[in-house]
Image (cartoon, rainbow, N blue to C red):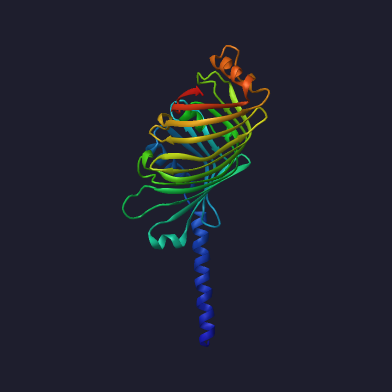
Amino acid sequence: MNKYGKGILISVYILTFLASLYYFILSSFPSKEMGSYLGKMINENFPKFRASFGRVELGPDLSLRIKPFILKDQPLEKEYIRAKEVRARIQPLSILVLRPLVVLNGTIGSGYIFLRSEIPLRGSSSVDSFHATFKEIDLSSSALNELFLDYKIKGILSGDVQIKGLSRSLPGLEGKVDLKIREFSLNFTKFNLGIREVDLEQLEVTGTITNGNFKAETVKGKGKDLNLEVLGQISLKEPVANSDVNLNLNIISGPKFLDKFPKESPFRAIVEKRLKSSNRISIKITGTLKGLNWQIK
């Protein structure tokens, strides 16, 4: 056998070995044990939550696949997130610089979340940053906003969020926000604001986060009963519901805007009086996310 024949034979042996190893890894992957490990890890690090996994599999591309992923409240068993499928993989070349780049894809309803995050192997072991892209996420399929803010948000979310400083406290966060929500609805039933809810056909939110302060660069909403614009900032604190709010809300009201206020609401008479002279209303919003104070200018 000449040297070319030996080279081909060696190549066949190597490919056969790699194919056998690949098949062995896929067929012997400990799905049940991996699901138990991931659930235990999340429950230990986040005691308020209980994570459960349907099936945990290793895909042909060696990505980890979870069908479904469910996140619940630990004592009450209330379901906060249900993802039909979550896929996780590590980009191989990123391991060479000791900062593995983990890519997550989650399917929630008819939408999905695409998340990229680096996991440092030197120094702090905690994740410090992420870049999340949302596409057509139905916010009503998740109850996380009720957990953090005590009110209900509905709508279809798309856009990007980039955050740095997760290893520090909330006042140390840096980042950018660029989001759009269509069919937006904010229910105020748990607040004594004298208004039932705000409905918008579309809401656009862009802003920056510097040292934990979110500065609203563009917050505009358009609806049948009102158009609005918000300026100002939110200073993030732990827990999130205690974050300080300092915002100016400018509203151009439609003919049915007053109907949003119950007849017994103390704000209704003030708004009605203002609307007689102009369809523009300016409102100063202060307090915290869980306890907002409104002052009509």
Q: Indicate the quadrant where residue 40 lies.
A: top left
In the picture as drawn, the residue positioned furthest to the front comes out as: 277
In the picture as drawn, the residue positioned furthest to the bottom comes out as: 2
Q: Position of residue 152 (x, y in %)?
A: 54, 28
Quick one: 259 or 187, which is closer to the camera? 259
Q: Indicate the quadrant where residue 136 lies.
A: top right
What residue do we see at 54% from left, 14% from top? 266
Q: Is residue 113 above or below residue 291?
A: below
Give the number of marks: 0
What residue do we see at 62% from left, 21% from top? 277
In the picture as drawn, the residue positioned furthest to the top comes out as: 264
Quick one: 202 or 254, which is closer to the camera? 254
Q: Position of residue 216 (x, y in %)?
A: 49, 39
Q: Position of residue 296 (x, y in %)?
A: 52, 23
Q: Would you say 95 lies left or right of 260 here? A: left
What residue do we see at 49% from left, 22% from top? 295
Q: Position of residue 147 (x, y in %)?
A: 47, 29
What residue do we see at 38% from left, 46% from top? 165
Q: Is residue 1 above or below residue 184?
A: below
Q: Is residue 60 above or below residue 79?
A: below
Quick one: 31 or 132, which is closer to the camera? 132
Quick one: 83 or 182, which is closer to the camera? 182
Q: Would you say 175 lies left or right of 220 here? A: left
Q: Would you say 140 lies left or right of 163 here? A: right
